[in-house]
Image (cartoon, rainbow, N blue to C red):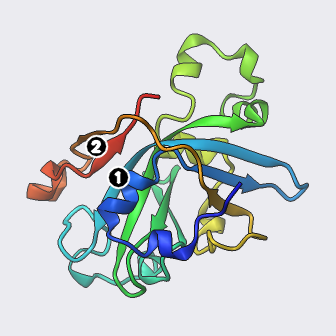
Amino acid sequence: MQLLTREFYARDTLTVARALLGQHIVRKLPDGTQLVCRITETEAYIGPIDKACHAYGGRRTPRTQTLYARPGTAYLYLIYGMYHCLNFVTEPEGTPCAVLIRGAKAVKNEDIIAENRFGRKADRLTAYQRKNFLNGPGKLCRGFMLTREQNGLDLTDPAGPLTVCAGPPPQQVFTGERIGIDYAQEAARFPWRFWTEE
């Protein structure tokens, strides 16, 4: 599979958020096993103007420092003290912007991903579990064994444990408001969520 380059991420965040749909996240485990999923849902976060972004208005803390890194850097953080969220840093270095990966579909080693999520192989999942397999940022990180330990990884390093490779673009893309950010005032209504139902 063809690795996405740093130039892919260095573009406008909304462009990258849409372009990530259909691309493949590849998680390399220490034993060489690869977990692969296809991205089905994303959200854009643009620090300078976005009250929903952790770095809104130039806020810079130990937690948000990664948002200022080179494009193509993984930004992982913890919410509610229990769920991790995977983001990809976008735009030129020093501009705090990123794309949250909200949902995906398993492509390779689904049994391992299912074991990570539910403690059972994919063919033993209930209809409810299958429907809610990787349809949320915390679910995706749990299935792919991603935590704060992977924060700051270079997604463009072919030898790295976390990369993104080219996949077929979706035929149809839907756009809407982002989820769970009612606190963000007018930014809560920005149509910066993108998804596909393929």
At a point 48% along the width and 83% down the height, the residue shown is 69
Dividing the picture into quadrants, the one containing residue 45 is bottom left
The spot of residue 104 in percent (x, y) is 53, 39
Q: Which residue is mark 1?
A: 43
Three-letter amino acid code at disc 1? Glu
The relative height of residue 110 versus residue 85 in the rendered view (above or below) is above
At a point 55% along the width and 49% down the height, the residue shown is 23
The spot of residue 158 in percent (x, y) is 74, 70
Q: Residues within 10 Å of mark 1 (few under 14, many from 20)?
A: many
Outermost residue to the left: 186
Outermost residue to the bottom: 94
How many angstroms separate mark 1 from mark 2 (CA)? 9 Å
The spot of residue 188 in percent (x, y) is 16, 51
Callout 2: SS: loop
Q: Left of 141 or right of it: where is 64?
A: left
Q: Locate the N terminus by quadrant.
A: bottom right
Q: Residues within 10 Å of mark 2 (few under 14, many from 20)?
A: few
Three-letter amino acid code at disc 2? Ile
Q: Along the line of sight, which residue is nearer the eye, 2 or 100?
A: 2
Nearest to N terminus: mark 1 or mark 2:
1
The spot of residue 103 in percent (x, y) is 48, 40
The relative height of residue 164 versus residue 127 in the rendered view (above or below) is below
At a point 60% along the width and 54% down the height, the residue shown is 166
Q: Along the line of sight, which residue is nearer the eye, 166 or 130?
A: 166
Q: Are marks 1 and 2 in contact (CB under 8 Å)?
A: yes
Q: Left of 192 or right of it: where is 63?
A: right
Q: Which residue is mark 2?
A: 179
The relative height of residue 6 versus residue 139 in the rendered view (above or below) is below
